[in-house]
Image (tube, coloured by chain):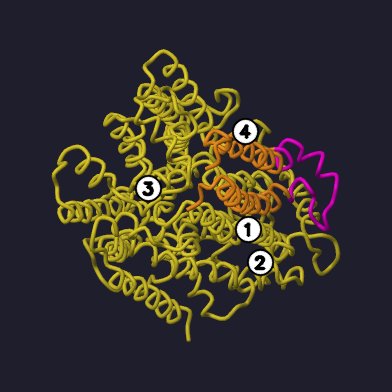
Chain colours: A orange, B yellow
Amino acid sequence: MHPEKTAKQYWKRNLRLLVILFSIWFLVSYGFGIIFADQLNQISLGGYKLGFWFAQQGSIYVFILIIFVYAALMNRLDREFDVNE
Amino acid sequence: MTILAWTYLLVGITFALYIGIAIWSRAGSTKEFYVAGGGVSPLANGLATAADWMSAASFISMAGLISFMGYDGSVYLMGWTGGYVLLALLLAPYMRKFGKFTVPAFIGDRYYSNTARTVAVIAALFVSFTYVAGQMRGVGIVFSRYLEPLLSSFELFSLDNTGKGVVIGMVVVFFYAVLGGMKGITYTQVAQYCVLIFAYMVPAIFISMMLVGNPIPQIGLGGSVENGGYLLDKLDGVLTDLGFAAYTSGQKSMTDMVFITAALMIGTAGLPHVIVRFFTVPRVRDARKSAGYALLFIAILYTTAPAIAAFGMYNFLDSVHNKKMAELPEWVQTWEKTGLIKINDLNQDGIVQYTSDPATNELDIDKDIMVLAGPEIAKLPNWVVGLIAAGGMAAALSTAAGLLLVISTSVSHDLLKKQLMPNISDKGELRAARLAAVVAVVIAGYFGINPPDYVAAVVALAFGLAAASFFPAILMGIFSKKMNKEGAIAGMISGLAITIFYILKFKFNLFGGGSENDWWFGISPEGFGTVGAMVNFIVALVVMSFTKAPPADVQDLVEDIRIPRGAGAASDH
């Protein structure tokens, strides 16, 4: 581990990534799927109303993406800080 | 071949497969019994986690539930999938690095306290037993529905058919959970996932082609029906005409939607039988990836369910409502015999009317019908019906086995080895684990045969308790170095206490009971786990602030689990 790249920094970078990913997680489910669902329902996605689509389909797809993006970025972070297995 | 013959054949083959896998993967040490030796590939673990997670209720009942709830049913879809994001990003990698066998082991070591360990054991037993009883019941119901002639052909302790089905389920689970432990469970769960997802998707794909001409149900749900117009718009229109709420807009308050979704998410992330699956992979990065696979495999079913739900409701409105009794489709008559569809021509006009007013409604539909009748609605061959039976059983058995393992390891490892009999040998501990599994199977079977009256309420309880106890305690154990045993124990106990109180009050009518108008802040018992978790966090942080910081070696442990390097295989020491 480089002296300037400490465990503390690694943890900070991890937390920053978590804040970003959980903001997206919150936005697509609680935001688009519940709180703003009525407004989004004015927009159509094929035969779907958009708010309904986020609540029953879209949020789930985004959840999957979030986990794979997290796994990839954390693996990269591990290598950068030389803490990978 | 008849439906019955196909059902015998497919259920028979799958059971033989599960037992065969169990014998092949017999556990020889506690490490194999608890965490499958710690060498499961991320893909296999993802498949196993998906089967572990998806219960009889997910498979048989969830689509039907959404049929009748419409948009409000989204709480289950988002809640039971979004929890995996919490699990994958906040818990799984660190639990894997910690590298022990059980969730109470983490709580006990991190909070350097056998009191904390015991609180965790009690919570794990409580959550798992409430949940497993429903699974055994599910096995019994599937059995009695599909293999009625077989069950009626013999006597067993004067049990009814569902009871006999539960006993058969107990014997099968006994084989692979008791013999194989986590190792047996993991590989049977991989097989069970394949069986259940195939069984679920085949009817869904054909119904989607029939109704909207698109083989992908997820896209078909947004498609248009034969005689013009989008399927969802038509559903909205017909349902509002009949006096129901529109399918795509809900009746639940926004607050309640948010709280129920959050409680299910936090509860999912806190369920011990799901968390322990991440102890079985070799490395931290495998745990991260594995959680992604698990959600991907779960999502295949969870994004299909809302399509089955809407297709099913549309089918009823289109081919049963306002139709002459004599001209109903064949599948309606078939399922009328089982009592899952009830038609009562109240106004004697020979036409079936479905309305929101119980006084004039002539059609009563059990929610399970949406999945169970799928093959007949789509006019699929008999083998598909047999497949649904095998799939429903795969879903129930895989979840039951995962829960039984948590129960047995909590007893043999966290109570016996860590507290009562520290000198027990590995062989002795393995024997104790098997014995505990046997006792757990028997107790679970008893509750499956004599279910508490409120099976549905019990699920709310299991999720509420998991949300109020495990999730906050584990999260703070990883993300706060200063969290100490006093804070964690006080947090878990107060979170559990208030959640149990609220659910008993409003679901089981104790402590004076109460109706919807008495709910605190309009939060239903299903959503109260969120409040329980908040109480846990707040109490823990307050108590921590005026008690002693954890010892240096515990703070070092927290530093250590935050760094992936050095995650050896899961171990005891």
- Which is more foreground, mark 3 or mark 4? 3
Marks 3 and 1 belong to one chain: yes
Report crowding for label 1: few under 14, some 14 to 19, many 20 or more residues within 10 A (C-alpha): some
Q: Are marks 1 and 2 in contact (CB under 8 Å)?
A: yes
**Residue B525: % across, % down:** 51, 33
Q: Which residue is mark 4?
A: B256
Q: Is residue B387 left or right of residue B374?
A: left
Q: Are marks 3 and 2 in contact (CB under 8 Å)?
A: no
Q: Which residue is mark 3?
A: B99
Label located before the other in sequence (3 or 2): 3
Q: Kindly identify the amino acid type of the residue bearing the numbered disc 2.
A: Met
Residue B351 visible to an observer of this rendering: no
Label located before the other in sequence (3 or 1): 3
The numbered disc on residue B500 is none
The numbered disc on residue B325 is 2
Marks 1 and 2 belong to one chain: yes
Q: Are marks 4 and 1 in contact (CB under 8 Å)?
A: no
Q: Kindly identify the amino acid type of the residue bearing the numbered disc 3.
A: Gly
Q: Nearer the viewer, residue B287 or B119?
A: B287
